[in-house]
Amino acid sequence: LSQLEREKSQAIEDRHEKTLQIASASHDVYQPLFTMRAALTSMKDRVEDKLAIEEIDSAINYAESILKETIVSSREELNEPRSLVPLGMVFNELFTRNFRIARKKGIKLRFSPTSLYMNGSKTIILRILGNLLKNALTYTEQGKVLCGVRRRTHSIEIQILDQGPGINEIDMERIMSPFERGKEQLDDGEGFG
């Protein structure tokens, strides 16, 4: 058990360090965008192709919004205290966010009721489970998606079960690397990253 506690502590420390790196990198990328915006503003009156200026301005706005969201999210993750998070509340929020998508595809979305709690960050738990649920809904063409939690000897196990194609055994280890995806991708996303 002490080995598991050390590994968990190391994982938390590693995540904290990675979050700091992401926030720092996002801030660093923001600086050249600021310079580009200043140059674009000075060019607006001199360039005849106003549509090109608008397209560049729109692209800069989009990049800035992504970076702002990343910085804010990183700050929240670093500052959010770990607490006991009621999984029933998490499941309710995930259902509310996803039931229209499931209904539109004709997929039955179910969450097993639970009174269990999980020690962690609500933001991170919602993000992880939300990503897994999105994948389940994306890759399930028909049938159902079930979310639930099981008690284990010294832990709990959250499960998201779907009727999608699954992940090929050959791809299983590879897709755990940043920005990798399985062979059956349906969109142009960039993987788990």
Image (spheres, helix red, strand yellow):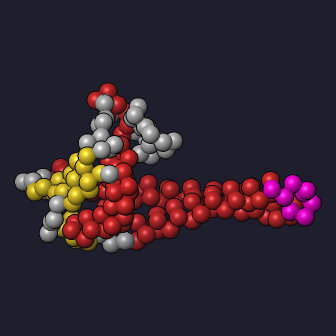
Residue at image position (30%, 63%) is: 95
* Magenta part, dominant SS: loop
Q: Position of residue 163 (x, y in %)?
A: 26, 42
Q: Is residue 5 above or below residue 139?
A: below
Which region is colored magenta?
Answer: 44-51
As for residue 134 lying within the magenta part, the answer is no
Residue 12 picture quarter: bottom left
Task: Classify residue 54 as left or right of residue 8.
Answer: right
Residue at image position (46%, 65%) is: 73
Q: Is residue 36 above or below residue 163?
A: below
As for residue 50 lying within the magenta part, the answer is yes
Q: Position of residue 114 (x, y in %)?
A: 15, 65
In depth, the one of 97 and 168 nearer the eye is 97
Whether residue 7 is visible to the viewer of this picture, yes or no, is no
Residue 56 picture quarter: bottom right
Task: Classify residue 41 as left or right of residue 83.
Answer: right
Residue at image position (70%, 59%) is: 58
